[in-house]
Amino acid sequence: MEYKIMLVEDDASIAKLISSHIEKYGYKPTIVSDFDRILDVFIEEKPHLVLLDINLPKYDGFYWCRKIRQVSNVPIIMISARDSEMDQVMGIESGADDYITKPFYYDVVIAKIKSQLRRCYGAYVPGVSEERKIELEGLTLYPERPELHFNNNFTVLTKKEAVLAETLMRMSPRAVSRDVLMEKLWDDQVFIEENTLNVNVARLRKKFQEIGVDDALETVRGYGYRLNVTWRKY
Amino acid sequence: MKIFLYDHISFVLLYLFNMLFLFIFYRNLGGFETLENVYYFIFLSSFLLGVFLLYRYFSNKRLYNKLNKMPFKLEDTLSSAGTTPISEGINRLLKTQYNLYQEQIQLYKLKQAEHLTFINQWVHQMKTPISVIHLILQENEGEPYVEKVRQELERISRGLNMALNMARLTSFEHDFAVETVLLHSIVTEVINEQKRYFIRKRVYPEVRIDSNVTVKSDKKWLKFIVEQLLVNAIKYTEGENKKVIVSACDSEKGKVLEVKDRGVGIPKQDIRRVFEPFYTGENGRKFGESTGMGLYLVSEVCKKLGHRIEIESKPGEGTSVRIIFSG
């Protein structure tokens, strides 16, 4: 089933970027362009979820949120540049289900959309019901287990190794800078050091070898690392 | 009393002079019959003078009191100076002046409020193009320019937040609520927000705060303080693999939060002026990216929250800033 998502955002470029991104994830976006008729559009379109900006011409997002709540219980996620606690509280009190502050990450928006849809309509969104996996020329990573499979061999990774492997596999054949890798490894509680990256790369190299992938993880001096496809599926 | 005496010295002098003159004049005309008459004359004159002075003093007593005690508030000038003609004149003058002054103040207040609204709206408007660039960058992840653009974007964001906080500071009274906050969670929150900056400069945070330490402060402003201190610590650290240590301890003065870096330190001649607005000093000139507002804002916020701030630095060895939460 295709979920319809209504997008109320007065900045055209942001609206376009979000809508094209959520389209990639299999949702059907509707951009509202007439900000006087948000409620009418909502009633006509019957979306499954609303992304609502707060700063709108004439009436603000809080107003429209209350208006929508009078006719529907559809999940509403607010997106706003206002980051004060007061605005977030007001957003939730106006009936919104979640709040995202600008600037935001696509992944966060998608994750929140998914969770709201799941909560509201029960069904899992397409693609999520299956286990996530990343494939590269016969090398398969299951980040949730986390395991790395090649031919008929497999090896169990640690969480950090899996994060590294995922980033490198996604970016291959491009090199990934140390900064980006360290950012991915950064843990909210235990902050990592330069050495953490070196250690994890060394461990990952060993695990690659275990399953028969040799010399794939190349060091790019002064920049970072690159995963070269040196293996062949047979 | 002093003002009264100074004010009437000319009267008294005139009177004395007049009496002396009359004496001489009268003696030349025929003189006094007896010495007693002389005394009587002097007594009568000084009695009249005394009565006159007393009358003057008591009728204008309120005016003199008012002139003696300088006002603490603008409203104090409005208290009545009495009902004699001169007092009423002064009352009128002060009242008119007060009103004119109020009018001007109101005008500036209005302008200030307008400016504040403008800055608020402007900053939020500027956040929209930042969000757009942020999204475009995410779609081009992996391209070599992305990281560089992102760095510049972060600088713009930091600048905008600074402007917003500067504007908010003027209306601070309506914008803070003191509560019990967990120091550890605030510090880690700020560190995680700044993780790119840490990684890029290869500086590593170390938190030495027990997870249950609490202080009485405003969460939002405390976050602002910690953010400024951390950003400074990262900015002025040169060379790789150095640490920024954030720690908390108890002292007799209260709980202390310390941000300590192993950076370039602050030259002796600059350290006393780091809390002044727009003062950038030698490091500011060397490192460029300095507005001279960071520590000033931090000290202002500390003042308003009732926290104390101390700074200690050795050039070449590092700087440590301590926030002392009293009580």
Image (tube, helix red, strand yellow):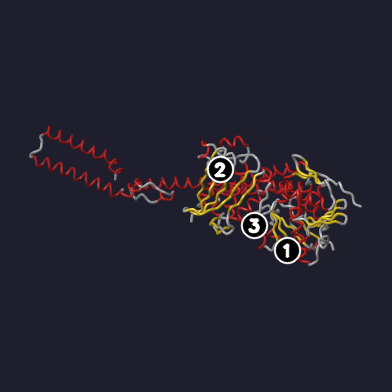
**Observer-nearest residue: B151 or B211?**
B211
User: Whole-percent x and y of residue B284?
Assistant: 59, 37
Q: From the viewer's perspective, is B120 left or right of B54?
A: right
Query: Is disc 1 surrounded by few (<14), some (14 to 19) or many (20+) residues within 10 Å?
Result: many
> Is residue A29 at least partly visible in the picture?
no
Q: From the viewer's perspective, is B95 left or right of A170?
A: left
Q: Please report the residue visible at 61 percent of the width from the left and 35 percent of the height from the top.
A: B286
Query: Please, what is the three-letter code of the amino acid marked with disc 3?
Result: Asp
Q: Are marks 3 and 1 on the same chain?
A: yes
Query: Is disc 2 surrounded by few (<14), some (14 to 19) or many (20+) residues within 10 Å?
Result: many
Quarter of the rendering containing residue A226: top right
> Is residue B79 at least partly visible in the picture?
yes
Query: Is disc 3 surrounded by few (<14), some (14 to 19) or many (20+) residues within 10 Å?
Result: some
Residue named by callout 1 = A68
Q: Please report the residue visible at 59 percent of the width from the left and 41 percent of the height from the top.
A: B263
Q: Chain of mark 2?
A: B
Q: Chain of mark 3?
A: A
Rounded to the nearest angstrom, the CA distance separating label 2 from label 1 is 54 Å
User: Whole-percent x and y of residue A187?
Assistant: 69, 53
N-terminal label among 3 and 1: 1
Do the CB atoms of the residues marked 3 and 1 lie less than 8 Å apart? no
User: Whole-percent x and y of residue A117?
Assistant: 77, 63
Residue named by callout 2 = B319
Q: Which-is-in-front pick, marks 2 and 3?
A: 2
Q: Which-is-in-front pick, marks 2 and 1?
A: 2
Rounded to the nearest angstrom, the CA distance separating label 2 from label 3 is 37 Å
Query: Please, what is the three-letter code of the amino acid marked with disc 2?
Result: Thr
Rounded to the nearest angstrom, the CA distance separating label 3 from label 1 is 18 Å
Q: Secondary structure at mark 3?
A: helix
Farthest left residue in view: B34
